[in-house]
Amino acid sequence: MTGLLDRRATPLLVGLVAGLLAVGAGLLAGADAAERAGLAARWTARAGLPLFLIAFLASTFVRRWPSPTTRALLRRRRQWGLGFALAHTIHLVALGINIIVYAPGRTWQSLVGGGLAYVIIYLMALTSTDAWQKRLGKGWRYLHRFGIYYIWFIFTASYAGRAFGADPDKRLVGIVFGCVMVAALALRLWPRRRGMR
């Protein structure tokens, strides 16, 4: 298992397969074209979330539970970020089709917030090399640190909106995934606070 996780191609393949499976599941589960497009958009976002959480928590996993497996995740953290970018590109296509064809009434606030998240995702993906890290210097760290927390915020805000929304079918999903996001942040920050005492 550790050997598989330590391969550079594994996160990209996971991102591709997760995104395509989510699209397929949405297309099969929907009763009509509009529902199929909505489910594909919704489920592709969820498909990319585990890849984001691996990149978000890789260093935390090593600090908390050092092992060959967690070290392999940390070594391939950039690739997990790229796998997330790939899965979320599939989500972007599914979401775009849903918005343009079936649900054009989105608010400009959600489009701006989500659009900025995509700008950050692609900036992080394009600069995920040693050469760009050297070229940007400290700016590379600022970009990636700000970016990963901003993406966390967008996920969390999206699920919080569902948790406190009027649709009871989406409320449980919002509560569960919102709690996952808050727990991920707490896990990432807790070792640092502990070490500062």
Image: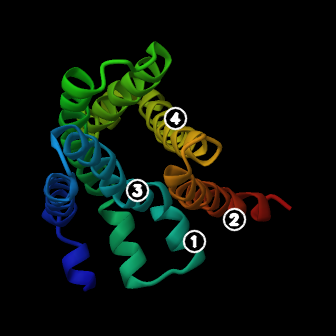
| Real-space CA distance between mark 4 and mark 1, rounded to the nearest whole angstrom | 23 Å
Sequence-first disc among 2 and 4 = 4
Residue type pointed to by label 3: Ala
Name which of mark 1 and mark 3 comes first in the sequence: 3
Q: Amino acid at mark 4?
A: Tyr
Circle nearer the viewer, 1 or 3: 3
Distance from Cα at disc 1 to Cα at disc 2 = 8 Å
Which kind of residue does numbered mark 2 sit on?
Pro
Label 4, secondary structure: give it. Answer: helix
Q: Residue furthest right?
A: 197
Residue of label 4: 150
Is residue 83 visible to us here? yes
Q: In x, y percent, where is residue 104?
A: 30, 19
Disc 4 + disc 3, Cβ < 8 Å: no
Where is residue 136 shown, x and y percent of the image? Answer: 37, 27
Q: Upstream in the sequence, badge 4 or badge 3? A: 3
First along the sequence among labels 4 and 1: 1
Q: Is residue 121 left or right of residue 194?
A: left
Looking at the image, do the residues carrying marks 1 and 2 touch, with CB atoms under 8 Å apart? yes
Q: Which mark is residue 55?
A: 3
Q: Is residue 140 above or below residue 187?
A: above
Instruction: Please tell me which residue is depicted at 54% across the width and 40% down the height of the picture.
Output: 149
Q: Quadrant of residue 180?
A: bottom right
SS of the residue at dot 2? helix
Can you say which quadrant of the picture contains the C terminus? bottom right
Q: Determine the secondary structure under disc 1.
A: helix
- Which residue is tagged 1? 63
* Circle nearer the viewer, 2 or 3: 3
